[in-house]
Structures are given as C-alpha cells and as structure tokens.
C-alpha cells in the first residue's frame, strides 16, 4: 500500500454492466503496469438492486480490498423500479450515490451521472462534500452515451471521465474495447470514451489531488479469479470430467470448466441435482477418469451420501465447496466461512477425507492440484473449500506462474500386466481392498481391464469387495482407510512447500491465525500493525484435514497470545484447532464477522488492538470473543 | 492398443463365467423372485456376447441391490437410489463397457425417481432392471411406490391412500427408448427381454416383477401371466408411441386387478443414444476418455495455453 494508491468504486444497478466495465478497467490498469485487486458487492438478483465493484490499484503488490475507497463513479440505476421515497427499498434511483458515501475516504472524488441522478436528491451532499473534502463532478454521462450510441454505453462515458480525472492514458482501455467488441458498437463506444475524456479534460477544473499511480511490471501479467485458478489447476492435473448443478458461487468453476472441457477432449454434465452430480463424478472416477464435482452449501449437503460412498469404496473424488452465507439459502451472493464443520464432517461414519482451504488465487491453483494428486494416489475424496470472496475477486498474477507441466497420472491404478501378477481371491476376484502398500493404499483395477473384476460397495467389505460384517476385517479395513490420513499428513509435512503460509517477523510477540480467503487481508493488517509498533505475525492455515498439528502447535507456542480471524458466528476454526490440539484454549481469542461483507484490513487491525490493549470497541459488524477463561 | 483388452474381445462365453468362483451364501429368502433376475441375466450375457470383465453391473440398495454379489463381473453396489448416475457416468467415461444398472422399485421409482426420469430422458445407452416386488423388501415390508392402493403395511396400517406409480408409462414419457415388463416366473421371456435390452442402443428399462414371499403377504406370484406378444387378445405396434402408451396404461391397471401382462411395450431403434448425441454436438471425445489415461503417449493440454484470455 502506498499513499498514491487508487481505490476506484463503480456503483450502479445490478444488470447495468458494472461487472464487465470494472473488469476491463482493472485489466487496463494492469496493462498500464499496476497491480490490481477487485472486490465485488452484489445483491442476489439479476436485475435491480444496488451493486458495486471496487478496483484497487497500486505500484506495490495489492492483495486485499482496501479500507474504504477514494474514487466513486456513480452511474444511474436503470432498473430502479420505484423511485418514490417511501417505497420498500427506499429511494432506489439515487442509491448508487447515497449508499456509497459513508465509505468514501476524505479527499475522495465523486463522479455521478447527472443524466440519471439528481444531486439535490441526496441529503446534504454539498455539506458532506465540504466536510470531507470530496471533489464532486456531476456529468451527463447518459446524454453523452445517447448522443453517440445507446444509453447503456454510459459506463464507457464514466470510464472516459475517470481516465481524464486520473490523468490516465486511455490506449489500454481502447485496446480492450477492440478485443471485446466490433462494428458499430465498437465505434460508438470508442467515440463515447474519447468524447468523455476530452470533455472532462477541456471543460473542468480539477480540484482534487488524486491521480492514477504509475508502475511497471517485470513480466507479463494475467488477471484472474480464484475460480479461474481452480479450473486451471484441475485442467493441468488432467481432470477431464465434471458434473454439476448450478448454485452460486460454485457455478463459476462449473462454467469455466464446461467452457473448456469440450475443446480439450473432456466431458461436462449438467445433471438433475447435486446427488447425481457427485454420483456421476464417482462413476467416472471408478472407470479411470480424473473427475470432479462441487457445489455450494445446500447443494453440497445433497452430496453428503455420495461423498461417504467415495470414502467407503476408496474411489478418488475431488469436490469443491464454494461457501456462501448460511444457514439454508442464506445470502446467496455473500461470502462466509461457516461451512467448515459441514465440509469436515458431513456424511455418516468417521470422516475419511482431505480438506484444503486456499488463501489466495495462487493457492487455489496449487491446492486443487494437490487435491487431485492426493485423491488419485491415496484413493480418497479431497475437498477444496473456498468462498464467494475468493471466487469473485480478480487479481494479477505473473503469467509464468502457470507455466507448469501437466500431470494426468491416474494415480494408483494398475495396468492389465500388473493385474495379472496381483493377488486374486480363490473365487477369481481381484483383491481390490487388500492390505495394500506401505501407505495402506491397495492399487485398483478399472472396469474393462482383463482379470480385474471386483465389487465396490458402500457396505463394509472384505479384501475382494464382498459385503462382510466380520469384526476383525472391519477393524482392519477401517484402520487402513483412516491410516491413509496419517500418511498424507506425513507427506504434506515433508513437502518442500507447506500449504500453510507464514507472514510477519518470526520473533513476533503476538499471532493471528486465519484460514482460507481472508489470509491476505490479514497479512495486510499485519504490516500495518507492525508499522504501528506492534509485534505481530500471522499464519494462514489451508490444511484442515488432516490437520497440520505440528505447524500450528509451533506457531501458537511461539507467541504470547493469538487472534483467530474467521467469517462465521461460532468460531469453527478455533474450535477445530482446540479439538485437534487439545490445548491452547486460554491463548486463542476469536475475531468474527458474519454480516456478509468480507473483512477490511483496518477491522483486523482494530480487532487485534482489542486483544492486546483490551480496547473496548471493535468495528461495527465484527465481534470479539475472548479466549476461554479470559 | 487398448488398455482394456476385455472390451470387445471375440471369444466363446460360457454362462458359468457369470457365477463367482466361490458362490457366496445368498441372502435372498427361498422363493424370492430375485433369483429369477440373476438367472435370466446370467443366461442373457453369453447370448449378447459380453464377458464379465467388460461388464459393469451397478446396483442400488435393497434386497435387489445384492444382485452383483452373486453375479461375476465388475460391480458397484452404490447407495439407495443412486445406481443410475454412477452407471451413466461410467458409460460416458468408457462407452466400450456394457453397463447394466439394477435395483428395487423403492430404489428406482421412489428415492431415485429423479435420476430415473433424467436417465431415461437422456437415453443413455444402458440397461436398467427394476426388481418390482411392490414392496420395500430389505427394510421389512413397508409400502413402496408401486404398492397397490389400499395395501396395508406397518407404515400404512389402514392401507395406503396413494395410487401406485405407473412405471412403464413414466418411462415412456420420460424418454426411454426400450420399455418392457417381465416376471421372475417367466424365465425364458425374461432372458430374451434382458438380451434385447442389452443389445438395444439406448436406455432400455425393464420392469421386472419379482415376487417377495416374505413380505408381500398377498403372496403375489405373478401367475398366470400373459405375454402380450404371444396373445391374440392384444394387438399393438411397439414402435408406435401412442399405441404403446395406451397398452402400458392397460397393463399397469390390470396388474392391480390381478391380471399379469408382460412383454415388450415400446421400442425406438432410430433415436440416437446420449453418447452419440453428445459426440454429434462436439461435447464428448470420439475415443473413450478412460483410454487416454492409460496411454503413455497422450498429449495433455495445459492451462498455460489459455492465458491469452487473461492478459
Ligand atoms: C438414504 C437411505 N434411506 C433409507 C435406506 C433404507 N433402505 C434400504 S433398502 C430400502 C428400500 C428397499 O426397497 P426396494 O428399493 O424396493 O428394494 P427391495 O429390497 O424390495 O429389493 C430402504 C428404505 C437407505 N439404505 N438409505
Ligand atoms: S425379503 Fe422379499 S425381496 Fe427380500 S430377499 Fe426376501 S423374498 Fe426377496
Ligand atoms: Mg422392492
């Protein structure tokens, strides 16, 4: 973070093209040499409702939404249904302006479309502007768009005005438009962009100081989301089968995969429900194909029984759980991390699964690959749990990061030659569930291979797959299946790169623990805390099952006290940590948020100060739960 | 060369190959109709020329779900109601396999009813055998979706107030391209129908009447039965949707009046199977996907080649 960073917010009606406009703007900034990060806020409907996207850009790396923002582009809400003040949703039309003012930082810039919004309709706009040193530029964006094209093109006019006010070069924006459009539409948009740019440059006197930061990248950058990274990791790991049923925010990964799979020899199936989706992935995997499925909370609940079937039949399976705020349908487009226990324990019987929660886009890619590798090597289901935040945020990454070797290896499957030499039961059946190798993994045959016949069953079974309730066999099979988790833990602990991410000075006095998508927001807060004279480090935990006992123990032992930051109301990760480690209760405080909005760095800063100094207040919308016995 | 040499292997096949080398003690009651399905299936397999190693028999949960415990092939005994989604993915992943799904009336028409409708609609090239004993066998005799109205059981002590579902009509409406009903007491017809169903290129649904002497106290044995193709009383064109629909309606109604009508009720040999449809629109590879994972020379696409979208 620097003093010159830009935090641009484009606000308007949902359905007004805010998303695509912001994506292109972010990409233009990236092409101009800046680091970018986006944060999306949108309601759970297609049309109507107030939405915004924030683009944060800086010459330094950016990895989180910022605190507030410093440039507002308020477009009109073309879908405002009822402009009367006493309508249920309030005064919809001016919401893109009114709803965003509270978070606009001092010295900020406001551009609003006076073609659609009346500044006079906003209570005390002038007084507030004066008080906060806001610089207000009313522009008739709609009029400009109408004059040269169509009304919907007012987004383009807004971007042109933004570029002028920020003293930005518009060539990158023009290039992106040329990539995305053609013909008359392109011509009209280009004209509107230039007109707006020139008009603002020529006719307005700038009173604000804010300008676009400048920067330079050492290498080619790409702009993508957590969902892109998950899909790409799956493709690089040889996944060529996906089955699913749409549900926000999981739909993103499902869609990206479905768009690419047919072109690369894969199969995507949209099916009747999530039970079927998980069952199809199991059927494909059983048949030798690397397969995945996934959903969000409610759909994932339906996958519970197939998930257990994969555990019992030792069928490799990769599932995604894209969390959103619950319970039940909850808040479909809002992030939350309250499905942790659901993912860890759903389905009958003792859990036999691997669960990873990536902390950022790069980790999404790395950990989905690890999830596939482990699932197919160890014949176990792996689940990648992430959330609406990581799903939707865009961030630039070095393109070279993705320059990796693919690995389509189907894991511990056998060839027909190997099957011929392997142990068979006197009945002729292949011993699919025998003692296995030193890891307890018993290599599998695949239907269609000669001599590999076996029965896979969700009932407890003997080595050749026959249903069996023999007590000794039961314990042997349970121990073997569960034992694989210990081996997986050992393998992960011994790997060069831990999935856990450390941040801040090693010798710090205090610790912050976080899991999943808020990791980088916490890291930003750690920098600020240390700059402010505190002594803090952070640990971002991704391995949730098998739990990274050694790493977490070492981290907690090395600090005086620890704050556990997570987006749920019942401190599920803190609970898991105490259950797994069996101690540290008095050392672990919780800092929670579950209002549907991701943490901002300053909230974590203040939450931490609450722990250390016992400051009485935490920011609105967050909650401090002291350690046991505190 | 294929990594799955069992597939399409040309050789003599003996029906004994489908009996496990050491036969497990059957868990079915004496006189259970399920034995009839097992026997008919074992007889049909050599006739259609498929071997145990190229056959995947996917079952649900119920007495009927135990079928693959006594049948020698690749088997997947799944969970209650979910045999079809597992089975159809296996067929998509490796179209060379002979995929057969089987389960009870509760399994297929009740808890798995949604999958039944959609698998039929999509016309996956597979065979689906529903053991219809008009009862929940394994859980001790509760009313099932095919139990007749008025049927008394421990969970409907005063008799069921529900109309039974019409499995054949439902199958037709949903889109199955082969629909037949046979009965355990009619082994020859059963074998022939199973063989036909397996050879049919599309979703072939067999409603297989299986008596449950243990729980179906009305002791339905499904005798005497009439084969509509053999009887002079019935004359309809099995390839005509409308006539088939009328016939099915009558067959379903008559069952509850004590008259057992069996035979082939519908077939459409022109409709493309789902796999063919998917391939035709470019949504499925021409070669079996499963083969690719066993081909050491296979080239795998990389995400690095998709990065131009993100620059
Ligand atoms: C999700 C689920 N619900 C309930 C059961 C219990 N259950 C097992 S088999 C069965 C019904 C069996 O009836 P049917 O499918 O007709 O098979 P049959 O035993 O008659 O062959 C039930 C309810 C289960 N195993 N799983
Ligand atoms: S309970 Fe009925 S269906 Fe089950 S095995 Fe016995 S006779 Fe057959
Ligand atoms: Mg039944």
Image: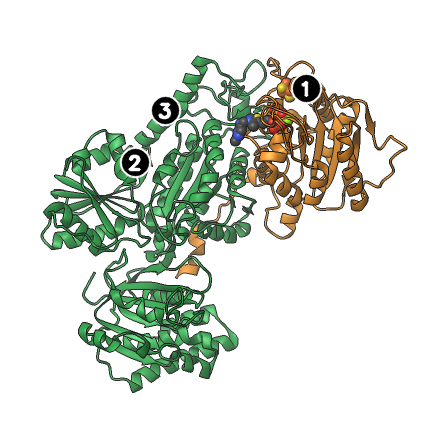
Residue A148 location, x and y as percent? 46, 82
| 3 or 1: mark nearer the eye | 1
Q: Is residue B211 visible?
A: yes
Q: Position of residue A84 (x, y in %)?
A: 40, 72
Instruction: Identify the subunit bearing mark 1.
Output: B
Judging by the rendered image, the residue that carries numbered circle 1 is: B217
Q: Are marks 2 and 1 in contact (CB under 8 Å)?
A: no
Quadrant position of the C terminus of chain A in the picture: top left
Q: Colour of chain B?
A: orange
Labels 2, 1: front one = 1
Q: Nearer the viewer, residue A198 or A397?
A: A198
Tell me whether marks 2 and 1 sit on the same chain: no
Q: Nearer the viewer, mark 2 or mark 3?
A: 3
Q: Is mark 2 within 8 Å of ligand 1?
A: no
Q: Which mark, residue A483?
A: 3
Residue sticking out furthest to the bottom: A203
Give the crowd class for mark 3: few <14, some 14-19, many >=20 residues within 10 Å: some
Colour assigned to chain A in the rendering is: green
């Amino acid at each position: 973070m620097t003093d010159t960073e830009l935090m641009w917010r484009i606000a308007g009606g949902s359905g007004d093209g805010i998303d695509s406009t912001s994506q292109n703007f972010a990409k233009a900034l990236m092409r101009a040499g800046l680091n970018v990060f986006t944060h999306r806020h949108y309601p759970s409907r297609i049309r109507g409702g107030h939405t915004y996207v924030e683009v944060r850009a800086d010459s330094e790396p950016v990895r989180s939404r910022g605190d507030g923002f410093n440039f507002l582009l308020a477009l009109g809400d073309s879908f405002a249904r009822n402009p009367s003040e006493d309508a249920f949703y309030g005064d919809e039309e001016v919401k893109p302006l009114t709803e965003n003012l509270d978070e606009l930082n001092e010295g900020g810039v406001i551009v609003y479309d006076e073609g659609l919004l009346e500044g006079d309709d906003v209570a005390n706009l002038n007084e507030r502007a004066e008080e906060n040193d806001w610089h207000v530029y009313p522009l008739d964006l709609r009029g400009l768009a109408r004059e040269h094209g169509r009304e919907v093109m007012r987004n383009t006019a807004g971007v042109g005005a933004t570029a002028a006010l920020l003293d930005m070069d518009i060539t990158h924006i023009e290039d992106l438009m040329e990539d995305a459009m053609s013909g008359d539409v392109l011509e009209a948009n280009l004209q509107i962009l230039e007109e707006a740019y020139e008009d603002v440059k020529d006719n307005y006197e700038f009173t604000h100081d804010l300008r676009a930061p400048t920067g330079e990248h050492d290498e080619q950058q790409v702009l993508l989301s957590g969902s892109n990274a998950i899909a790409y990791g799956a493709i690089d790991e040889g996944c060529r089968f996906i089955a699913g049923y749409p549900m926000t925010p999981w739909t993103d990964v499902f869609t990206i995969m479905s768009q690419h799979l047919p072109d690369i020899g894969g199969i995507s199936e949209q099916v009747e429900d999530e039970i079927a989706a998980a069952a199809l992935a199991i059927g494909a995997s059983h048949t030798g194909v690397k397969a995945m499925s996934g959903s969000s909370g409610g759909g994932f609940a339906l996958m519970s029984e197939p998930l257990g079937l994969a555990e019992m039949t030792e069928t490799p399976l990769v599932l995604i759980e894209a969390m959103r705020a619950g319970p039940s349908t909850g808040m479909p487009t809002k992030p939350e991390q309250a499905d942790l226990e659901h993912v860890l324990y759903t389905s009958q019987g003792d859990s036999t699964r691997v669960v990873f929660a990536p902390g950022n886009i790069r980790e999404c890619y790395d950990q989905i690959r690890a999830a596939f590798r482990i699932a197919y090597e160890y014949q176990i289901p792996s689940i990648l749990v992430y959330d609406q935040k990581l799903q939707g945020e865009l961030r630039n990454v070095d393109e070279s990061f993705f320059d990796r070797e693919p690995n389509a290896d189907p894991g511990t499957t056998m060839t027909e030659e190997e099957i011929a030499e392997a142990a068979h039961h006197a009945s002729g059946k292949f011993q699919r569930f025998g003692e296995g190798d030193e890891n307890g993994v018993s290599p599998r045959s695949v239907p269609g291979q000669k001599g590999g016949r076996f029965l896979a069953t969700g009932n407890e079974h003997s080595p050749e797959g026959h249903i069996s309730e023999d007590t000794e066999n039961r314990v042997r099979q349970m121990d073997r299946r569960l034992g694989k988790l210990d081996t997986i833990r050992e393998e992960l602990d011994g790997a060069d790169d831990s999935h856990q991410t450390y941040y801040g000075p090693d010798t710090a006095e205090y610790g912050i623990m976080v899991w999943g998508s808020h990791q980088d927001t916490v890291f930003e807060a750690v920098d600020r805390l240390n700059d402010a004279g505190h002594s803090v480090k952070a640990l971002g935990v991704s391995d949730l099952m098998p739990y990274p006992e050694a790493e977490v123990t070492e981290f907690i032992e090395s600090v005086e006290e620890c704050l556990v930051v997570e987006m749920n109301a019942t401190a599920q990760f803190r609970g898991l940590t105490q259950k797994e480690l069996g101690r540290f209760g008095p050392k672990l405080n919780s800092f929670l948020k579950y209002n549907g909005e991701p943490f901002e760095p300053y909230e974590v800063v203040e939450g931490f100060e609450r722990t250390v100094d016992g400051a009485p207040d935490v920011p609105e919308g967050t909650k401090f739960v002291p350690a046991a016995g505190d | 060369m294929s990594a799955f040499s069992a597939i399409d292997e040309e050789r003599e096949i003996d029906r004994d190959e489908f009996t496990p080398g050491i036969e497990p003690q059957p868990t079915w009651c004496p006189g259970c109709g399920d034995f009839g399905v097992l026997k008919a299936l074992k007889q049909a397999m050599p006739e259609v020329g498929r071997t145990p190693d190229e056959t995947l028999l996917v079952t649900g949960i119920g007495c009927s779900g135990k079928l693959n415990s006594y049948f020698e092939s690749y088997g997947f005994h799944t969970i209650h109601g979910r045999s079809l989604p597992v089975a159809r993915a296996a067929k998509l992943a490796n179209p060379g396999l002979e995929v057969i799904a089987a389960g009870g009336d509760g399994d297929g028409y009740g808890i798995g009813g949604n999958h039944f409708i959609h698998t039929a609609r999509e016309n996956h090239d597979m065979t689906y055998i529903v053991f219809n004993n008009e009862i929940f066998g394994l859980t001790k005799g509760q009313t099932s979706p095919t139990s007749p109205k008025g049927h008394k059981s421990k969970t409907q002590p005063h008799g069921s107030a529900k109309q039974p579902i019409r499995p054949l009509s439902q199958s037709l409406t949903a889109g199955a391209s082969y629909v037949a009903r046979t009965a355990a007491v009619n082994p020859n017809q059963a074998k022939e129908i199973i063989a036909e169903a397996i050879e049919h290129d599309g979703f072939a649904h067999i409603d297989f009447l299986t008596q449950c002497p243990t729980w179906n106290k009305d002791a339905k044995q499904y005798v005497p039965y009439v084969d509509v193709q053999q009887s002079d009383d019935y004359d309809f064109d099995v390839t005509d949707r409308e006539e088939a629909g009328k016939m099915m309606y009558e067959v379903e109604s008559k069952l509850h009046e004590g008259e057992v009508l069996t035979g082939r009720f519908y077939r459409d040999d022109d409709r493309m199977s789902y796999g063919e449809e998917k391939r035709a629109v470019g949504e499925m590879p021409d070669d079996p996907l499963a083969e690719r994972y066993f081909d050491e020379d296979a080239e795998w696409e990389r995400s690095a080649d998709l990065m131009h979208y993100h620059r």
